[in-house]
Image (cartoon, grey):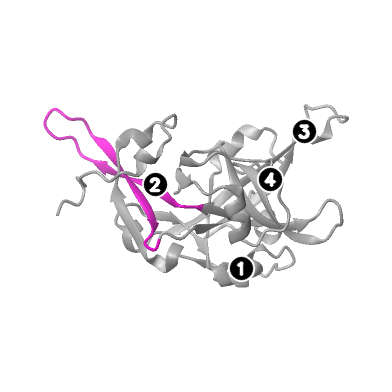
Amino acid sequence: MCGRYVSTRNGADLAGLFQVTLWEPEETLAPSWNVAPTNRVWSVMDGPDPRTGEVVRQLRPLRWGLVPSWAKSATVGAKMINARAETVAEKPAYRKAFARRRCLLPADGFYEWVAMPASGDKKAWKQPYFISPADGQVMAMAGLYEYWRDRTVAEDDDQAAWLATCTIITTEATDAAGRIHPRMPLAIATDDWDAWLDPGHRDPAELRALLTAPAAGRLDARAVSTSVNRVANNSPELLEPVPDPAHPH
């Protein structure tokens, strides 16, 4: 599972990094050291330019937590922040998006937790870890996006009726992430961005083959403060290392 992550790069940096040709500079998202479900997050996708109809690379904010087009309520999105790679092509909630609406979700890294047993007067607790590419490069997490229309909104207010949401594809964890948590987000290698984002590319086996371990599995993991457990806490201090109680040297 990936339930929190870090995304601090601004729109201009991401547009350059992912060779985006369509984005609105006035549409900004603040850097976040504690991205949580239902937050708005940056996404990279290939889709039609509203002005020309040409398929172009776009940078857009989406709400994290996918809401299928057939859902009766947007509240289901909070439970659909991750899609398992093993079943994403078949699950009704994700299969259409996997076939047609794939995206990249840029991240600096992600958080996972290790359960710590009670000791003495201290109750059982969870130690958070920040896991990130060892080379400090951006993680292009594999994602899906979907559009949902709120049918309680009047037909003449069509723009307000639509909600754009996303989910992160996960798999069994490896390397540094594997010693922390059994699941981890998948990533798309730079050379495969075009193939993954191409809405015309629909072969499930070929698409699955593009899903890889972040940074080719070369990840660092460090214990960080339990302050990250509270969503309201959001600052660079969350990434400061602390002594590792689960893996003492």
Q: CA distance from mark 4 to mark 1?
A: 31 Å
Point 20% across, 45% down: residue: 243
Kind of element beneath mark 3: helix
Q: Earlier in the sequence, mark 3 or mark 4?
A: 4
Q: Earlier in the sequence, mark 3 or mark 1?
A: 3
- Residue 247 appearing in the image: yes
Q: Which residue is mark 2?
A: 111
Point 67% across, 58% down: residue: 20
Measured as percent of width and height from the top left, residue 234 is found at: 43, 35
Looking at the image, residue 114 lies above or below residue 38: below
Task: Residue type at mark 1: give it.
Answer: Leu
Q: Which residues are magenta?
A: 107-135
Residues marked 1 and 2 touching at CB (< 8 Å): no
| Left or right placement of residue 167 versus residue 108 in this view | right
Kind of element beneath mark 2: strand
Q: CA distance from mark 3 to mark 2?
A: 33 Å
Residues marked 2 and 4 touching at CB (< 8 Å): no
Looking at the image, residue 16 lies above or below residue 153: below
Picture disc at residue 25: 4
| Left or right placement of residue 115 versus residue 92 in this view | left
